Amino acid sequence: MLAAGHPLGTPATQSEPKVVSKRPAPFPAWSAIDEAKNKADAIAHEAGREYNLASKKAQEKAGKIEPGSLKYYASCTFGGLLACGLTHTAVTPLDLIKCRRQVDPKLYQSNIQAYRTIRAAEGIRGVFTGWSPTFFGYSAQGAFKYGGYEFFKSFYSDLVGHENAHKWKTSLYLTASASAEIIADVALCPFEAVKVRTQTTIPPDIRGTFSGISDVVSKEGVAGLYKGLYPLWGRQVPYTMMKFASFETIVEMIYHQLPGQKSDYNKGAQTAVAFSGGYLAGILCAVVSHPADVMVSKLNANRQSGEAFGAAMSRIYGDIGFRGLWNGLPVRIVMIGTLTGMQWMIYDSFKIFMGLPTTGGSSEDKKKGN
């Protein structure tokens, strides 16, 4: 008989609730990685949003910046100050080891051994010996170098005319950068003198940047701050000429090899090109300017009071020979390559922040299909 009250005449059965077993994720590490990636993306997105807001506010406050205007040169000057001041200060430990090995090649057996020895004897503060004159000196130098380069590039371009400027663009880069560096080194030289003395005297007899300047002036007069100016020009002018001319050329070559035009690439891509071009240019700079760099260190550390420049050069060269002029080159290649790449990246990032075009690349972008 069919059960009463049931549509099919069968006893009603109550369905038991399904038990869902919670199995652990097969690869919990993947979930952790995904979670960390999502958090990083969220932070990056927020940072990007804040950066864009800050950039917009800065551009609104500054107003429209026309290339060739005083506002433009002021922006480039401040960008250069940031680019050189921050990067040179960051690599102070490498610079300290380089300077000490240039002055006394027997002091340390290797760069790693030098770092460990300084760290053990003087602590982390000792590793950054000379950071203060480095910061002030290279901030001043960077301001005059980058701001001056933009000014002289425009000045000489107007002087010879647009057509000749494009035809002889490499010569224009070389002349503009040399002009800017001559002025920049006058600002750098006093700080460089204090920096080298601080780094090459163990223990340092100069403790502060401006007290060090006063100490040198009281003992040797103002001329004591500039006794390394000629070799500094000998180091920095060829260095900067190579730095700017090779950077402009390398960046133009990179964009020429990439598909499309420079304007097709976003801010991140353009700063990546700036870093790559700067790093390659930095390697060339290090090789070209290294003998003069060694001589600057030697002169600031060992030049005798009242000794003529030529006599000091001859005496030092007699002591170290041609081979000695290349002491510390490998570490300087690493230092200058990284330094120059970071400088161009910071400089162009600041120009982007202010709404200005990045440096380098042909002003007449190649057309697709060429």
Image (tube, rainbow, N blue to C red):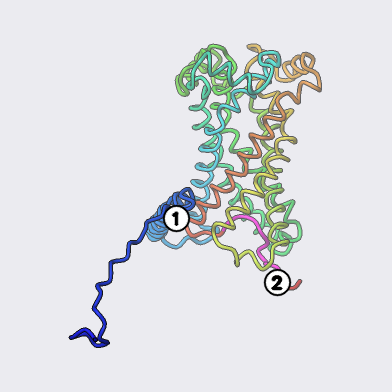
Q: Earlier in the sequence, mark 2 or mark 1?
A: 1
* Residue displayed at 66% across by 54% down: 156
* Residue displayed at 51% across by 38% down: 86
Residue 363 part of the magenta-drawn span? yes
Q: Nearer the viewer, residue 323 or 116?
A: 116
Which label lies toward us, 2 or 1? 1
Residue 32 part of the magenta-drawn span? no
Q: Residues within 10 Å of mark 1 (few under 14, many from 20)?
A: few
Q: Residues within 10 Å of mark 2 (few under 14, many from 20)?
A: few
Residue matched to label 2: 367
Indicate the position of residue 121 as horizontal and vertical percent values. 53, 13
The reply to whether the C-beta atoms of the residues labelled 2 and 1 are less than 8 Å apart is no
Residue 309 vs residue 55: left or right?
A: right
Residue 353: give its label. Answer: none
**C-alpha distance separating marks 2 and 1:** 35 Å
* Residue displayed at 27% across by 71% down: 15
Residue 26 vs residue 177: left or right?
A: left
Residue 41: give its label. Answer: 1
Q: Give the amino acid type for the residue marked by disc 2 in the picture.
A: Lys
- Count of labels in the image: 2
Q: Is residue 357 above or below residue 326?
A: below
Indicate the position of residue 212 as horizontal and vertical percent values. 49, 19
Mark 1 falls on what kind of element?
helix
Which of the 4 quarters of the picture holds residue 177?
top right
Question: In the image, which residues are magenta?
Answer: 358-368
Residue 225 vs residue 369: left or right?
A: left
Image quadrant where one finds the C terminus: bottom right
Q: Give the amino acid type for the residue marked by disc 1 in the picture.
A: Asp
